[in-house]
Amino acid sequence: MPKFSTDNSLLDRFKDINPKEINWFPGHMFKAGKQLQQMLKRVDVVLELRDARIPLASVNLEFEKLLGEKKRLVLFNKTSLAEEETIQDWGRYFKVQGISFIFIDVLEKRGLKKVLPEIRKMMKPRQERFERKGITPPALRLMVIGIPNVGKSSLINGLTRRKATETGPTPGVTRHQEWIVLDRDVELLDTPGILFPKIATLEMGLQLTLTGAIKDEIVGRERIAEYLLSVLQERDASAFFEHYKLDPQHQELEAPQLLEIIGQKRGCLKKGGVDLERASAMLLKDFRSGKLGRISLETLRNS
């Protein structure tokens, strides 16, 4: 199975990047964070959406503090892009942690039918208390929370089976808060994701950027593309080699040189040589769409 050279530590070539410079915290998201403190008082259950490829890095640390004892169901999205064995490992881990969770894939429509039944199961004691008093239980109110570009709006659309909110590939595109009726007894508040104001490590910042939670321009597409190639150096790269029709001798190349080869093979050229910006954009698009195979960025071994 083709693998890259692993002579250098994965992060060594990115030491010039300061994690503090990767922070991306638009004003509207800061405002939404303040609003969430008030909205939490009005909901019964929080649907916390995470990226299955980075189940820890996609935790919103600031929101964790606000959540407190509020009921929560964690939904790990984009499972079709993560390695199956790693997903199973994380499932066992979170089960031991006592966390209520479901693995889903919004675009593939996997796991969505489990969400409302699980919520009703979680809230059954509350509903029964109303019924014992002869009172019709009020509608369960839910809130979606997660980092940018993790699939919040797509989740809303999938649960309602209609295009209810604005979606797009740019982090932070959903800006307005509104109640959406999911069923006769369930209402959901769609809220913008909030990225924590401080990124703890360089690796976390790069992972968040690679998965699209942070704009590529913050770090630079070329550097992010090189980081992706560095990640692939440490694992089976068969799908990657096959996709770009790379030769065995390319296995020993460092990330910058390999990026140039890919650009040449795909015709990403400009006057004077390879258009590395264009080649990087293509590589990142292929990764994010799953064309390079299922790739988990966080495993229990490296977390």
Image (cartoon, helix red, strand yellow):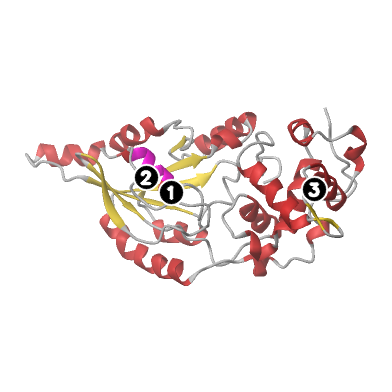
Q: Residues within 10 Å of mark 1 (few under 14, many from 20)?
A: many
Of 56 and 25, the residue lying toward us: 25
Q: Which mark is residue 57?
A: none
Q: Which mark is residue 263?
A: 3
* Residue 293 in picture, x, y percent from top left: 67, 33
Q: CA distance from mark 1 to mark 2?
A: 6 Å
Q: Which mark is residue 152?
A: 1
Q: Are marks 1 and 2 in contact (CB under 8 Å)?
A: yes
Quarter occupied by residue 302:
top right
Residue at image x 33%, y 37%? 161
Quarter occupied by residue 32:
bottom left
Of 140 and 288, the residue lying toward us: 288
Amino acid type of the residue tagged 3 in the rendering: Gly
Q: Residues within 10 Å of mark 2 (few under 14, many from 20)?
A: many
State the predominant SS element of the stretch in magenta: helix
Q: CA distance from mark 2 to mark 3?
A: 37 Å
- Identify the magenta region: 154-159
Q: Nearer the viewer, mark 2 or mark 3?
A: 3
Kindly state the secondary structure of the residue where label 2 is placed. Answer: helix
Amino acid type of the residue tagged 1 in the rendering: Lys
Query: From the viewer's perspective, is residue 19 above or below residue 100?
Result: below
Residue at image x 40%, y 34%? 112
Q: Nearer the viewer, mark 3 or mark 1?
A: 3
**Residue at the disc numbered 2:** 156
Q: Mark 2 or mark 3, which has the lower sequence index?
A: 2
Kindly state the secondary structure of the residue where label 1 is placed. Answer: helix
Residue at image x 66%, y 36%? 291
* Residue 123 in picture, x, y percent from top left: 27, 40
